[in-house]
Image (cartoon, rainbow, N blue to C red):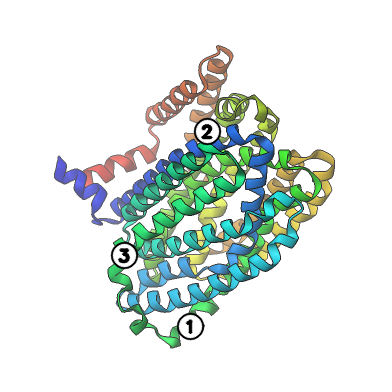
Amino acid sequence: MFGKIKSLFLENRTLRQTVFKNAFWLSVGNFGSRFIHAAIIIYAARILGASEYGVFSYALGLASFFVIFSDIGISQLLTREVAKHPDKARAYISTSFAIKIFFLASVIILMLLIAPHFSKIPEAKTLIPIIAMLLIFDGLRNFGFAITRAQNRMELETLFTVLTDISITTISFFVLFANPSAERLAWGYAAGSGLGLVMLGLALRNWFKNLAADFDKKLVIPIISSAWPLAIVGLFSIFTIDIDTIIIGWFLNASDLGLYGVAQRPVQLIYALPALLATSLFPILSKLIHSKEVERVRAINERSFAISFGLAIPLTFGGIVLGKQIIYALFGAEYLGAVLTFQLLLFTVILVSPEILLGNLFFAYGFRKIFIVAAALGAVTNVVFDFLFIPRYGIAGSVVATILAHIAILCCYWFKMRQIHSFKIIFRLSRIIPASLLMIVLTSILSRWGINVFLNIGISATTYFFFLYLFKEPLISEVKKVWKAA
C-alpha cells in the first residue's frame, strides 16, 4: 500500500497519473497555504478595520500595476521550453534568469519613482518601498517554481509555498500583535516572503551553481520575442483586475477599498482551482502539441473543462446562497457591506475558469495575437465601465464592469478555440448541472434552518460529490483509473 501511495503521489508514471499528481500537489500547496494565509488575512482585517486594511489592499493593487513588467512571461515561457527541450535546460534557466533580474530591477526602480504619484490615499505611499521588496521576493520565488514545474515536480512547489505562507502568517501575527498597522502588516509579508525565497534557493542550489557559465546570448532575443505578448497580456490583465482597486481609490475612500478587498479574497481562492489545473496540464500539453498528438490534446482539454465547470458551478451558486453568512463568519459585522460585491464577484468564477484553461492552451500552441486582442478588449471594457459605474454604484459597479470584461475576453477565446478543436463540452455537463441544482436546494434549506455556515458547506460539498457518483459521472471513474494505475 505504501509503495502504491508513493508511486501515485511522488513519481511520474503515466500521463493520467502525472496530471493527477501535479494537480493534487498544487492543490494541497495552494489551498493549504491559502488557508494558512487566510488566518492572517482574517485577523488583520478584523484588527485593522476596513479603512486601515483598505490602505494595505490599495498598496498591493498599486504595486501590481507595475509588477507585470518584471517578468514579461519569462517564467511561464521557461516552463514550456524546458519541458520541450530538457537537454537545453541549464542554458534556458541561466539566460532567463539574467533577463528576469534585469527587468525586475528596472521595474522596481520605476515603481519607487512613479507609484507614489499614482496614489490618491496618502497613507499608502509609505508602504510602496516595503511592497516593492515583497514583489522582488515573490518574483524570484516564482522563477524557481518555473523550474520545478518544467520537471513535473509540483510537490516541491507545494512544500515551499506552504513554508512561505507559514512564515508570512507567523511573522505577521507577531508584528501585528503589539502594534497593529498596515505598515507592520506589509513588513510581515515581506519578511515571510524573503524567508520562503531563501528556503527555495537552498533546495534549488544545484541548478544555480555556475549558472553564469551556461548563459547563452543567442537565446536572449528568442526568449524576449516569445515572451513579450505575455507582457502585453499581463498589462491588459492589470486593467481587467487590479485597475479596479486603483479606480476605486480615486473615486471612493479607504473603507470602500477594505470592503472590496475582503470581497475579493474568497473569490481569488476559487480562481486558484482552474489555475492549478492549467498549471498541472501545461508541461504535458506543451509536449503533446510539440509532437502533434492532436486527439490526445483534445481529449485532455475536454476533461479539464468538465473538471473546471464541475467545480465552478456549485461553488458559484452555493457561494451566492451563503454569501452573507460567509462574510459575517470570516470578517465580522463591519464588513457586511461587502456581501453584494462578493456575490457578484462569484459570477466571474464561471467565466474565469474556461478563460484560464483556454489561455493555457493557446500559450502551449504558441499563439500570440489572440492574447493581445482578447486582453485589450477586456481591459478597455473594464476601464470604461469602471468610470461609468463606480461613481454611481460604488464597488458593486466595479464588479459589474469586471463581469462584462471577462465576457468579452471569453467570447474572443471561444471563437479562436472553435478554429482549433471541436470540443464537446455541453454533453459533459449533463450530470454536473443536475447535481449542482440538487446541492443548491440542500444548501438553501440548511441555511434557512440556521445550520452553521461551515458545516453547511461541508454537507453540501459531500452531497454534491455523492450525486455525481450516483449519476455515474465519468470524472469519478477517472479518479479510480488513476488509483489503479499507480
Residue at 40% x, 59% y: name it.
197
Identify whether 126 is placed above or below 114: above
Circle number at residue 204: 3
Label 1, secondary structure: give it. helix
User: Residue 378, how many percent across, how many down?
Assistant: 69, 57
Q: Nearer the viewer, mark 1 or mark 2?
A: 1
User: Looking at the picture, which amino acid does disc 1 mark?
Assistant: Val
Residue 72 appears in which quarter of the rendering? bottom right
The mark that comes first in sequence, 3 or 1, is 3
Residue 81 horizontal side relative to residue 16, left or right: right
The amino acid type of the residue labelled 3 equals Leu
Q: How many discs appear? A: 3
How packed is label 1: few (under 14 Cα within 10 Å), some, or many (20 or more)? some
Q: Is residue 147 above or below residue 407?
A: below
Can residue 288 be seen by looking at this rendering?
yes
Quarter placement of the N terminus: top left
Disc 2: which residue: 314
Q: Quadrant of residue 297?
A: bottom left
The one of 66 and 151 positioned closer to us in this rendering: 66
Q: Position of residue 282 (x, y in %)?
A: 42, 60
x then y, percent, for residue 174? 46, 40
Front residue (pair 454, 19) = 454
Q: At 55% across and 68% down in the image, what residue appears?
A: 70
User: Quick check: can you spot residue 302?
Assistant: no
